[in-house]
Structure formats: structure tokens, C-alpha cells
Image (spheres, rainbow, N blue to C red):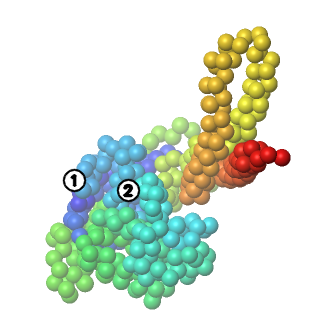
């Protein structure tokens, strides 16, 4: 399932290049349970990011489910992450203003599914939180928030679950409950790969991979695997500790020592926070749906004004150019009248879509206020339009009904 061949990942740090991963080869079969151990700066988080298609290796070959990952573009990587990989993070990463079931439904929304609540509730039921589906994250305990995060990871029924320190912020008893959920998922055939620095947590997996200085230094069955008689995916391998590798480059200019810090601090920063080292976070942009929503919302009143203006123009031009009014007039009336009704409906649709995207990805998109204003403008406009049309129909009916009676 997971095939890593001679993977290297290099991060430039000032005047040096830090090898977060240095020639890592690892095979994990379908249905395996693997724990990756190592101290801070050993490369385990970088390895997790590469396995989860959140980053690309500098060199080497990575195949997931038989597909070579290295040559895929960002859209293809996003598709694989959404369909085949579930992520569980130490800090939960829940959206604070959304209830539990909506947090669980986020992967379904990114997969463009329209009906998401039944699947989200089913995933919450699997982790024992069906009765807390409507609670906000701040109304849940740490263990419950982690269970919501697990439900979010499994809602798309992925074949691989990646857990980065899933019990790091939890007490011992709650950590045991979380690990029991992982055992239950593994029993259904899901591949589990978790990163931890706690040996007792790692021993609950069936295979332990230890890392140091960007290399795998130990690969063996766990104590649980020996006790249950389960065969590890590959035999234990012990590798001598490699020396740390750094490639020095000539500095373009002198840098004060206080500004650069020690090399060990730079290496830990590169390994623990690869995303920040690789590139700066992009600025949030106005979501296209939020941008279009207000345009459509305001187009309805504009079309009403255009209808009134066209009516006045027809009165002025009917004696000057009656042929033009007779031919072009009906077509323009139909188009403007149709847009009077269609524009606010499109404003509501785009406003709702834009608001959902901004709430789900606030770091990427802005425009929540614009989307809400568009929804309000469209909604009030449609209500007034419905009242006007109803009054016109009523007046017409009364005229037909009462107008024909003798006085």
C-alpha cells in the first residue's frame, strides 16, 4: 500500500541545507498497524507529511495504492488525500463555529457531496458521539474533540488513517479510549500509521519503526504483535545509527549569530514545521462565489429599473421608430423580466456557497460578510417581489370577477 524508496527531503535553512529525511525506504501493506517513533527533529513528522501527500520528497520514489505520487499535481494530490487518506492531528484542528457533525462533514463537502449529515452522524456513532452531534467544539472535552477528529478522518471511509500524536494532549485514561478506537478501525481492515514519542502507545501497534536523524534505525514487531502471534509486515531490521548530514553552502553575506541561532535549533525547526520552512502561507483571497453573489443580488433591482426605463423609452420612440419598438421591444421585455426573477435566486445560491467555503477554510478565503449581505438582499428582494406579484394576481382576479357584474 505504502512504498517509499530512498526518500530524501531537504530544507534550506539559512546557509545550510538540512536533510529531514535521508534515504528512507519503507513498505507498509494494506491492513497494517504501524507506529513511527522518534525524538523531536528525527524526521517522523516530515515522513508523515510525505505519506499523507501534504508534501513532496526532494528525491526518491513514493507509491500509494500502486500510484506514483511524485509526479502528480496539486489537484490530483488533493483528490487522493480526500478519497484515500484520513488525518488525525494532536491539536484536533476543529472549526470552532461549527457543531460536531458539520466538522465531521468537512471532507464530504470538499468531495462536493450535497447530502452530508447522515454520513457524518454515522461516523460520530462509530466513535460513540452520536448524542453530541450538535455541540460546538468548546462544549466538548479533549477526548470528545479527538473522537470528533477521528470521525472526520473516517467519514469518507479511507483505506489509510494517519495519526500525528493522537494522544499527546490527553490524559492516560482518555488516551486508552482513543487507542481502542484505532484498534477497532484496524480490525475492519483500515491501515493505521501513527506518529508518537510515547513507547507505551507505540507498543499498541503491531509494528514499530524508530527514526533518528532522518533515517530509520529500527523496524521490528511490537510487544503486542508477539503476544498475539501476529506477523509483522516485514521482518525486524536494525540499522546502525548514521551521523547527521548537513551540506554547507558558502554564505552570500555574513549573518549575525544571534539572528541565525544554533544549527540544532534550525534542524528541529525544519523538521517539526516543514510547511513554514518550505513556503510562506498564502494570503486569503475573496472567494469567487462570494464575489458573484452580491453582483447577482443587485442585478434584480437593476433589471426592474431597466424595465421602467425601457417602458419610458418605448413611449418616446413609438412615433419615431415604431418598427424597432415592435421587433426589439418584446425580446428585451422577456429578457429583463426573466432576470428580475433569476438574478436574486442565483444571488442566494452563490451567497450560501461562498459563506460555506469561507467558514470551512477561513485561512484561504474571505468574503463572509459579502456573502451574507447578498443572501439578505436577495431574500428581502424575493419576498417583496412575491408580495407584488401576489397583489397583481389578486387585482387581476378581482377585476375579472367583479368587473363583469352589472352595477
* Residue drawn at x 37%, y 64% as measured from the top left: 156
Q: Quadrant of residue 298?
A: top right
- Dot 1 or dot 2: first in sequence order is 1
Residue 34 image point, x, y percent: 29, 71
Secondary structure of residue under mark 1: loop
Secondary structure of residue under mark 2: helix
Give the residue at mark 2: 81
Q: Is residue 131 left or right of residue 405?
A: left
Pick the front one: 71 or 136: 136
Residue 233 image point, x, y percent: 18, 70
Pick the front one: 38 or 349: 349
| Mark 1 vs mark 2, CA separation in Å | 15 Å
Give the residue at mark 1: 66
- Give the residue furthest to the bottom: 173
Residue 355 image point, x, y percent: 61, 54
Q: Is residue 84 left or right of residue 347?
A: left
Any part of residue 229 in sight = yes
- Give the residue furthest to the top: 320
Q: Is residue 327 left or right of residue 121?
A: right
Residue 62 image point, x, y percent: 27, 52
* Residue drawn at x 31%, y 46% as measured from the top left: 70
Q: Is residue 81 left or right of residue 370?
A: left
Q: Quadrant of residue 319?
A: top right
Pick the front one: 5 or 100: 100
The local crowd at label 2, few if under 14, some if 14 to 19, many if 20 or more residues have their Cα within 10 Å, is some
The local crowd at label 1, few if under 14, some if 14 to 19, many if 20 or more residues have their Cα within 10 Å, is few
Res. 92 mark: none
Any part of residue 294 in sight = no
**Quarter of the image with the N terminus in it:** bottom left
* Residue drawn at x 31%, y 80% as measured from the top left: 184
Amino acid at each position: 500500500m505504502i512504498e517509499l524508496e530512498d526518500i530524501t527531503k531537504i530544507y534550506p535553512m539559512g546557509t545550510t541545507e538540512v536533510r529531514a529525511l535521508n534515504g528512507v525506504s519503507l513498505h507498509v501493506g494494506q491492513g497494517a498497524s504501524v507506529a513511527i517513533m522518534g525524538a523531536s527533529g528525527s524526521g517522523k513528522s516530515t515522513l508523515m507529511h510525505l505519506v499523507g501527500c501534504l508534501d513532496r520528497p526532494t528525491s526518491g520514489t513514493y507509491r500509494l495504492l500502486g500510484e506514483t505520487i511524485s509526479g502528480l499535481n496539486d489537484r490530483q494530490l488533493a483528490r487522493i488525500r480526500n478519497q484515500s487518506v484520513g488525518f488525525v492531528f494532536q491539536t484536533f484542528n476543529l472549526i470552532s463555529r461549527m457543531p460536531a457533525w458539520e466538522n465531521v462533514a468537512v471532507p464530504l463537502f470538499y468531495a462536493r457531496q450535497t447530502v452530508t449529515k447522515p454520513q457524518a452522524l454515522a461516523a460520530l456513532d462509530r466513535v460513540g458521539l452520536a448524542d453530541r452531534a450538535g455541540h460546538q467544539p468548546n462544549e466538548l472535552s479533549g477526548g470528545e474533540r479527538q473522537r470528533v477528529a477521528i470521525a472526520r478522518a473516517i467519514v469518507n471511509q479511507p483505506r489509510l488513517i494517519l495519526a500525528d500524536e493522537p494522544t499527546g494532549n490527553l490524559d492516560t485514561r482518555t488516551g486508552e479510549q482513543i487507542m481502542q478506537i484505532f484498534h477497532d478501525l484496524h480490525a475492519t481492515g483500515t491501515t493505521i500509521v501513527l506518529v508518537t514519542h510515547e513507547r507505551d502507545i507505540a507498543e499498541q501497534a503491531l509494528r514499530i519503526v524508530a527514526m533518528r536523524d532522518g533515517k530509520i534505525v529500527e523496524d521490528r514487531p511490537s510487544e503486542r504483535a508477539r503476544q498475539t502471534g501476529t506477523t509483522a509486515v516485514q521482518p525486524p531490521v536494525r540499522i546502525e545509527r548514521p551521523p547527521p548530514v548537513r551540506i554547507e553552502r558558502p554564505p552570500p553575506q555574513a549573518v549575525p549569530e544571534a539572528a541565525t541561532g544554533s544549527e540544532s535549533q534550525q534542524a528541529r525547526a525544519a523538521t517539526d514545521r516543514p510547511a513554514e520552512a518550505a513556503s510562506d502561507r498564502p494570503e486569503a483571497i475573496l472567494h469567487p462565489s462570494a464575489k458573484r453573489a452580491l453582483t447577482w443580488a443587485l442585478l434584480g433591482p437593476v433589471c426592474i429599473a431597466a424595465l421602467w426605463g425601457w417602458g419610458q423609452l418605448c413611449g418616446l420612440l413609438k412615433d419615431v421608430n415604431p418598427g424597432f419598438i415592435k421587433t426589439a421591444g418584446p425580446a428585451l421585455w422577456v429578457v429583463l423580466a426573466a432576470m428580475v426573477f433569476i438574478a436574486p435566486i442565483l444571488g442566494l445560491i452563490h451567497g450560501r456557497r461562498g459563506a460555506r467555503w469561507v467558514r470551512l477554510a477561513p485561512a484561504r478565503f474571505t468574503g463572509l460578510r459579502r456573502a451574507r449581505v447578498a443572501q439578505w438582499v436577495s431574500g428581502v428582494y424575493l419576498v417583496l417581489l412575491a408580495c407584488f406579484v401576489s397583489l397583481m394576481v389578486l387585482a387581476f382576479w378581482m377585476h375579472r370577477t367583479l368587473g363583469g357584474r352589472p352595477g
